[in-house]
Image (cartoon, coloured by chain):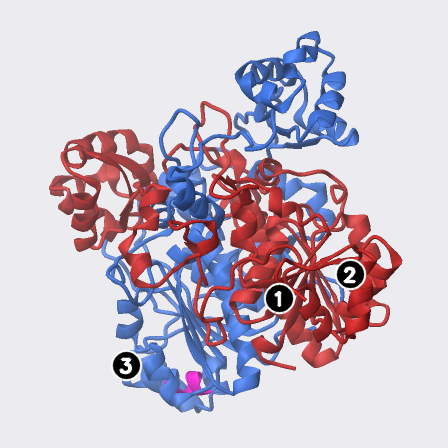
Amino acid sequence: MSGMSKLRVLDLSETVSGAYCARLLATAGAQVTLVEPLDGSALRSRPPLLSSSEPRRSAAFEYLSAWKRGIALDRGGDAGRNALLRLLDAADIVVTSMLASEALAFDEIARESRPALIHVSATSYGLTGPWAGWRSSDLTDWAAGGYLYLTGDPQREPLQGAGPWGSYVAGVTAAVGAMAALWSRRATGRGQLVDVGAMEAMAASHQWSLVMWSHQGRIKHRANNRHAEAHHPVSLMPVGDGWVCIAAPTLAQWINLCIALDLPEMAHEPRYATAGLRFDAAEEIDNRFAPFLMARTRTEVVEHLQSHHVPASAVLAMDEVLEDEQLQARAYWAYPDALGESAKMPGVPFTLPSAPESLRAAPELGAHSAEVLAESGFSESEIARLVESGVVKLGANDG
Amino acid sequence: MAEGMLSGIRVLEFGYAWAGPLVGRMLGDLGADVIKIEQDSARGGRLPDDPMLQAALHDWRRGEEVEPMLRASVFPEGQPGSDPWNRAGIFNKLNRNKRGLCADLKTESGKRIWRRLVEESDVIVDNFSPRGVKSLGIDYETVSQWNPRVISVSCTGYGHSGPFRQRVSYGPVLEAHSGAASATGYAEGGPMKMGHAFPDPVGGLHGTFAVLAALWEREETGQGCFVDLSQLQTYAAISGELLLETSVQGQAPARGNRARDCAPQGVYRCRDESPDARESMDMWIAITIEDNEAWRRFTSLVGDQRLESERFATVAGRFAEHDDLDRIISEWTRTQDRSDLSERLQTVDLTALPVLTNGDLMQSHHLRERGFIVEWDQPGVGVYEYGGFPIRFSDRERPEMRPAPALGGDNRRICEELGFSSEEIDRFVEDGTLADVPPLVGGR
């Protein structure tokens, strides 16, 4: 039963968090099957939508469903429900993103004759607690996790991150939970419900703000592109042709930075002696750094600082990241050809011995319906009956 | 002690800053025996008696400004005490459920201890640079000779290969390099970093998953492995659809707080009130109106004639007039309490949430009811609350919370378990291999 490639995962989720959890399991070698309703997963219409195809495909779906096979199944009626239960008989892990009441009811039914089943639920608030039934969006996930308040200009409204990153953090947290539950099952023989909420996953991803409250009663505020309130520079700074990030929180890095910027006299000035003092003097420090930085390009500044062991990078636009030589050299990208000649996306995030070798692009709706049903013990006539009665849809190239 | 889910798994953690220690903490919370291995200077040097420092501490009171040199450590009540290396909140919150070994692995004695540890362990986690890994002698090439079953997960910034493998980084540097910082920002402004070093927890959580997947695979193969985890890659992975979109469309998504497919969505100012902390706090609510049905419910709740105009009846119309809408909605929210308003909106199935601060999170009824807020008695520090473990298992008790180890706090015990005699351990202390205080620094 052990070994990643023997793991069978059913992905019933229609959210970024559930889909990313299942994608991670797939990139680690597990056999993941996406179970979609007959009109397709809600993720298929989630922005961003790509103009390279008609109807427009969702970049989110195409990215998150890579390395998964797909079956289209109407779970509403008895036949569909029974088919799903039979698929569950052959699964180790099922990933869902249902509303709390629905998820708990599903868990009860699914577990009835399958004590070894691991049910991973990835939602915004988790399945219990006073907010379990509350509605959420990417933006409210940012608000719930406490990151929204911390990001942006202190004089303006708080700012969300560019993507649904709270959901991604919930997704990877859920994948950790799935693997831990497998370990537990190895000892006990029992599966269990693994309940992950983006709010908690993000709250657990704070740097020092929670102890700043419990140990000192202080609120952590926004600080624009600086790293409030203890360090400087750990910030984005303008240079001649754009922006760079310079991060020099330690004394040694501060000294190296001053030397690199040809301002050695700043290295030992008492008013910059500690990280917090440097944060308080950030405006002044930035003004003194500006002439050197503004006279140079991002590349010049970054290479120069890195040669002095000061952590720094250019602020790259997304299209520049796609051409980045480091990611290219590490064979990071996967190429979903069907989405256009220029299409590329992150592939396997890190390589395990069990990782799949080449890309399996996201499935067309129902692409593997017959194959998956046959593997789960459905006879040919049973499959034909499910298709005829409209419970299962076959993909264009299936059957 | 309750049996943890990973009991029987031993992890050696060489964690620095945040990502590496987070891998250790997650595994420790799950019940693995995590040994944090530190050099004596890992938590900074020992400060000499400093009158300025003492005076600053004397004046400090709860809720007021903390003397700048002490901020980064987050000491309880701002007090570093006589052993500040064991009292920093930022360290202790990240290193619960671990044991502490403070050893110089480069001495002859240190090499003996290291080899025995590797022979007795399942997992080695680091987040040093490739150069640091090699110079410390903890590289996979070395350790796999002693224990072919060992799994080594190295969570570097850039990875162990490629032209930038020797670059040094922190989380914000990777935000810049991954495109995330340039994609984030106000609509008409420049790039923006996150309020915390977000690539760190993202990398640490992926690292934890990597450990567990590699362990599961080892059950089948009997073989350990090396996992070369680049935090640049794990951070870019959470922007997968944005990178794919850019590759196809040729341009990056728009910045700001708005949604792509519905309107209005925004962060609106609410009535400010005095929080428990003795400082100002601005109050905000995040609202998303997903469709026309939701818009109708919203307008009837607000009761402002201007919103009932025909030009706002469609998504396209609301997008076109988003600035105007934001102004009208803000006028309304400005007089309301953010928590009451969120409740009222959620009651009629509208998506809204207060923009929670660090204090709100720690006081959240929801997080408390779910058992996320935990506390433990940290020796020399006392009982304080912390953020807990983010996964609820139906078949397991919540993880036990054991305090973070003092520097070198488990030196003797661990060496005994490895089979070293009491005399040998005394010698390790004498020859400077084992320590439990940092080296004295000359000045600050």
**Badges 3 and 1: C-beta atoms under 8 Å apart?**
no
Query: Chain A is which colour?
Result: red
Position of B161 relative to A13 (above/below): below
**Kind of residue indicated by mark 2:** Val
Could you tell me which secondary element the residue under label 1 belongs to? strand
Judge whether residue B116 is colored magenta.
yes
Question: Can you identify the residue that label 2 sits on?
Answer: A387
Give the spatial CA distance, label 3 vs label 1: 48 Å
Closer to the observer: label 3 or label 1? 1
Query: Chain B is which colour?
Result: blue
> Label 2: chain?
A
Question: Can you identify the residue that label 1 sits on?
Answer: A32
Given residues B321 and A337, the one toward you in this image is A337
The percent coordinates of residue B300 (x first, y second) are 76, 17
Closer to the observer: label 2 or label 1? 2
Magenta range is B115-119
Question: Can you identify the residue that label 3 sits on?
Answer: B107
| Number of numbered discs overlaid on the protein picture | 3
The percent coordinates of residue B276 (x first, y second) are 61, 31
Q: Quadrant of residue B186?
A: top left
